[in-house]
Image (tube, grey):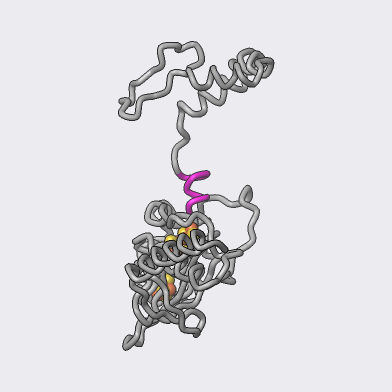
């Protein structure tokens, strides 16, 4: 290596070292082993920094897929806490373990055979009545769902209310991991929302109307024409289409209303 290259290399090393000094490292324990990781990282990023590779237990990295359930405890605190690894930031001396998969009970059923009778939910998930109203599920939920209230609504046969309350559930399973009654709340809620969507909520008339016109072949000709168009022309048509403005009101319509 020439003197010039050596000089360049040492300047680069100095810059790297300076950056490292600027980042404060904090100690955390991942699966029982101590690591020093930069302050401010999420648990997920801290684990990756420490050399862990997520093969599963990681999806969206944005708090919406529910794949990254993690369990941790802070020093001096007897309480076990849960969070999403992609959302929770590390704290000094935190003990962290990742939950790769949570083996929770999911009832088997033929959905087409179900009605909206609450007794059917009770039969599929009799453990509903093991709930002791401890509220640990609500405290664990990263989505801020009133989990215990949704379970109570179901126990009272109010499927619609359970569906409404659990609408933002991301199926992370953290409520289940803390449940005294061994309930898999997220699977039960999913059934409630399915029943609500298919059997309880009134049908949207405008949607049925639109599906009817599609089935009658209203768009067949234009779709056939588009299938014949070359790729570049298709791209041009797409790019030049009249897009709905972001702040459009409910009554917005495109200039060309032939396909509405
Ligand atoms: S209800 Fe349970 S599974 Fe759903 S988001 Fe909350 S903690 Fe996760
Ligand atoms: S954690 Fe389980 S037992 Fe406690 S309130 Fe929630 S559903 Fe009921
Ligand atoms: S990776 Fe999807 S919620 Fe964390």
State the residue in front, 25 or 54.
25
Q: Quadrant of ligand 2?
A: bottom left
| Residue depicted at x 64% and y 21% | 231
Segment tinted magenta in the rendering: 192-200
| Residue depicted at x 50% and y 64% | 6
| Residue depicted at x 63% and y 50% | 113
Q: Main secondary structure of the magenta part?
A: helix
Q: Quadrant of the N terminus?
A: bottom right
In the rendered structure, does residue 162 fall within the stretch colored magenta? no
State the residue in front, 112 or 47.
47
- Confirm whether residue 234 shows in the render: yes
**Residue 86: horizontal and vertical position, in percent?**
44, 62
Q: Is residue 253 above or below residue 166?
A: above
In the rendered structure, does residue 194 fall within the stretch colored magenta? yes
State the residue in front, 140 or 5.
5
**Residue 257: horizontal and vertical position, in percent?**
45, 12
| Residue depicted at x 44% and y 42% | 201
**Residue 194: horizontal and vertical position, in percent?**
52, 50
């Amino acid at each position: 290596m020439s003197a010039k290259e050596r000089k360049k290399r040492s300047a680069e090393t100095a810059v790297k070292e300076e950056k490292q000094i600027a980042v404060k490292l904090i100690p955390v324990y991942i699966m029982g082993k101590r690591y020093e990781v930069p302050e401010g990282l999420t648990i997920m990023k801290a684990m990756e920094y420490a050399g862990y590779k997520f093969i599963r237990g990681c999806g969206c990295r944005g708090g919406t897929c529910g794949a990254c359930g993690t369990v941790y405890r802070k020093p001096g605190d007897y309480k076990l806490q849960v969070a999403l690894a992609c959302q929770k930031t590390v704290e000094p001396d935190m003990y962290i373990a990742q939950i790769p998969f949570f083996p929770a009970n999911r009832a088997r059923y033929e959905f087409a055979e179900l009605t909206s009778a609450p007794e059917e939910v009770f039969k599929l998930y009799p453990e509903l009545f093991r709930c002791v109203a401890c509220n640990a599920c609500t405290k664990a939920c990263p989505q801020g769902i009133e989990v215990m209230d949704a379970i109570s609504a179901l126990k009272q046969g109010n499927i619609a209310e359970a569906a409404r309350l659990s609408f933002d559930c991301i199926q992370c399973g953290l409520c289940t991991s803390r449940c005294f009654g061994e309930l898999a709340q997220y699977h039960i809620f999913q059934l409630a929302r399915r029943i609500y969507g298919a059997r309880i909520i009134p049908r949207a008339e405008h949607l049925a109307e639109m599906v009817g016109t599609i089935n009658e072949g209203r768009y067949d000709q234009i779709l056939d024409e588009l299938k014949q168009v070359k790729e570049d022309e298709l791209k041009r048509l797409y790019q030049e289409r009249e897009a709905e403005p972001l702040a459009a009101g409910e009554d917005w319509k495109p200039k060309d209303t032939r396909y509405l």
